[in-house]
Amino acid sequence: MPPNRSKPNNLVQTIERVALIFDILGMAPNGISVGELSEKTGFPKGTSHRLLSSLAYFDYVRQDPVTKNYQLGFKLVELGNRLLGHLDFRAVARPFLIHLAERTKETVHMVILDRNEALYIDKVDSSEHRSGLRMVSMLGSRLPAHCSAVGKVLLAHLSDAAFDEVISHKGLAERTRNTITEVERLRAHLKKVFAQGYALDNEENEIGIRCVAAPIRNERGAVIAAISISVPALRSEKSKLETTLKDRVVETALNISRKLGYPQ
């Protein structure tokens, strides 16, 4: 998807086309043929083939030897891992996330707000996961901020102008019957999140999954990320999220923040 910002007047056409190709390939797990790409982009087949061949040469895309379809290349994985490596707080937080997952026997996530969405930058499954259920979330995947616990934590600490920008670009899509879809109701909800220091997702993003999240702060007290515990709704009442699990995620988030220099 195109970025949620104004298009520059000096945008290079080839770069714009490559970005579109990456977006399309990213939504095609089985790859895509030159012809299919041309149909989706409107590029001539010759142009599509030249772009794909050039990207393949530099390992940004790869061609399946059997189907001949093109897929995203492993060079992007390498660059993505380098980017994650540059997020110093991720390395600091990692041991705390592992401890939290093992302590609760649940799945733990860490996210940041990127392009007005919640972006997964880390995930830990307990080695003694009780349900056998594994969250389908993946590093680098995104989810709406307004209906996820981690997203609501991040939204709650935005300025009014930044919050309005998120809503104007992303809207408030109804993911489940529990999703908050009215702006003023969400504003009031986020004020509560800000005051209490944590957020809940009561099957608002996905039926069958509940989450509780808390903010990660840097040395200046600014919220830079959020962490959450995700649990199957069938074996975890909402009340448990607001007691035991809430206390543990808030405690862990505070310990990470202190490690990053937050003075509280």
Image (tube, rainbow, N blue to C red):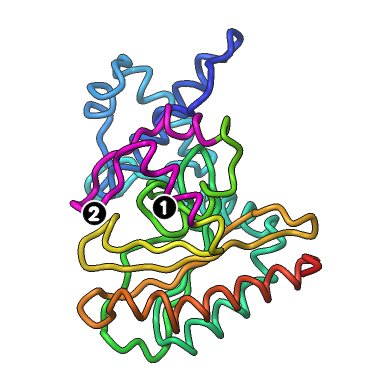
> Residue 21 at what x, y percent from top left?
39, 30
How much space separates mark 1 and mark 2, taking CA atoms?
A: 22 Å
Left or right of 40? Residue 102 is: right
Residue drawn at point x = 30 percent, y = 63 percent? 202
> In the rendering, which numbered label is found on residue 178?
2
Which residue lies at the image location 44% right of the left edge and 42% below the top edge? 187
Three-letter amino acid code at the position of disc 2: Asn
Q: Is residue 105 above or below residue 26?
A: below
Marks 1 and 2 close (CB-CB < 8 Å): no
| Vertical order, 10 against 230 (above or below) | above
Left or right: residue 130 compared with residue 17: left
Residue placed at 39% from the left, 46% from the top?
146
- Along the line of sight, the residue nearer the viewer: 48 or 194: 194
Q: Which residue is mark 1?
A: 141
Name the one closer to the observer, 40 or 213: 213
Residue 168 highlighted magenta (yes or no): yes
Q: Secondary structure at mark 2?
A: loop
Residue 215 visible in rendering? yes
Label at residue 85: none
| Mark 1 secondary-structure assignment | loop
Q: Which residues are magenta?
A: 163-192
Single out the mark in the foreground, 1 or 2.
2
In the image shown, does 122 or 195 lie closer to the viewer? Answer: 195
The residue most toward the top is: 9
